[in-house]
Amino acid sequence: MPLLQPPSTLAPRGGSASPWPVLLAGGIGGVALLALGLTGQANLEVAVLAAAITFGITLLQAVRTDRGRKAAEASEAGAPAIAGAGPPLPFAAMLDALPDPVMVIAAHEPDDLIGRRFVFVNSAARELLKVQRDAGLLVTVVRDPNVLEVADEALFGGLAGQTAYDLGGAQDHVLRALARPLGRGDDGAHLALLIFRDETEMRRVERTRADFLANASHELRTPLASLSGFIETLRGHAREDEGARDRFLGIMQVQAERMSRLIDDLMSLSRIELNEHVPPAGDVDLTGAVMDVVDAVGPIARERGVRIEQTLPPRGKAMVVGDRDQILQVVQNLVDNALKYSPDGGAVRIGLETGLTSDAAAAAQRPQSARLALLTPDHGPERYAALRVADTGPGIAREHLPRLTERFYRVEGQKSGERMGTGLGLAIVKHIMNRHRGGLAVESIPGEGATFTAYFPQAATPRESASPEAAAGGADPALVMKLS
């Protein structure tokens, strides 16, 4: 009997006998009644009526018996036992159409650790687990020991179970694995059903809520305490001191602005994390995005005497897959950081290369620098456009590199004065790059500055030029300029 086409329980099992012996017996009874009437032992009309009723009952029973026999035969062939129900129910097609990933697993001996096999995988499971075959060893597609344990309990213990299953990778993907026993197959193998339910969104919402509350309560406490202290002072002995009042009000305004920026960044980070698992689908001109940011920060750079040097391909030659607002946020944060840490009279260099592999995009630009990949995309056949932003500031020591994208982390000695920020800029950049299936890397030499590289998957566009310069990701000399 096929594994995924069980017989219907509605089919009668006792109707396999032929109906004609029943019909023959009924006919003999009818003839006997008719003969009895003709001998004068009973009224002739009554005898004829009785014979007709007997024939009718016998014929009805014969038809019912014949239908039962045909239904049983259809059931044995895997078809539904309901008359007129059509062809056999496609149980495999029904499982294949389910939105949840489903696997049927089989095993013979508990001690045969490599004998656990999957014998059926629906479309959702093939896509989720990257399964290439319809059957094979279970450990080739599921390696989590907790999932394998609940599978064994269902196979050999007849117990239903469930466990969390983290797929890992650059994008968090958390599943709930449920195992249900299915008894034994025709070959004596123990069978069980594995069902995977996606809990990524639920976990992400809960984590975002908890992180937001923890971060907000922690980071808002300092400026709130400062504001409360100054308000208390102004209401007390400094009430009539005009100089102190003006000084304190200025400090209070700075603290209030800091709180506003902090809340904006926290809300922005929460929104990004909430939708981090949904990749963007639009096309964005990365050259145009960089130019827009440079135009916005140009006055600040000129005021401090910091040069912004750009090496960019022409517009339309660096098209990437992404959300334009978030890409602008990445460029803005990286350029703002570079301006913040570059000394007066220094330089910020912005470069953009296209047609790179992920390894080439993340490669170090200076061999002697300390380099770290802060985010590495799941490797695929894509080509990337790499944005590099370098400053001429104090640089970052090697031991600080792994923590740069942590929330509110600041390198010791670089927290005071005009360099104060919310500490969320690089965390926002990392989560945006993760949503865009891109990468982020940093390299630095203490005393010589730091370079941040963010690389995005390129979009296939007919506007790309076939020229050797464009194919190599070369820059247009007309767009290499310096702003002083």
Image: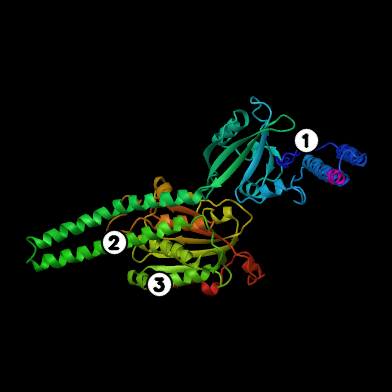
Task: Give, as a three-letter code, the residue at label 2.
Answer: Arg
From mark 3 to mark 1, how far is it between C-alphas? 86 Å
Q: Residue at x 21, y 63 (%)?
A: 252
Q: Which residue, as the protein is rendered here, is positioned at the far top?
A: 111
Out of 19 and 112, give the one closest to the viewer. 19
Residue 318's x, y, as percent? 57, 67
Circle 3 SS class: helix
Circle 3/circle 1 CB separation < 8 Å:
no
Q: Is residue 98 magenta?
A: no
Residue bearing the label numbered 3? 296
Disc assigned to residue 341: none
Out of 474 and 163, give the one closest to the viewer. 163
Q: Is residue 436 left or right of residue 241?
A: right
Task: Give, as a three-letter code, the residue at label 1.
Answer: Gly
Which SS does the magenta portion mostly show? helix
Q: Residue at x 20, y 66 (%)?
A: 250
Q: Earlier in the sequence, mark 3 or mark 2?
A: 2
Can you see residue 198? yes
Circle 3/circle 2 CB separation < 8 Å:
no
Front: mark 1 or 2: 1
Residue 30's x, y, as percent? 88, 41
For residue 382, what is the image quadrant? bottom right
Circle 1 SS class: loop
Q: Earlier in the sequence, mark 1 or mark 2?
A: 1
Q: What's the magenta region?
A: 46-52
Residue bearing the label numbered 1? 14
Residue 199's x, y, as percent? 51, 48
From mark 3 to mark 2, how far is it between C-alphas? 21 Å
Residue bearing the label numbered 2? 258
Residue 262's x, y, as percent? 32, 59
Quadrant in the picture for the N terminus = top right
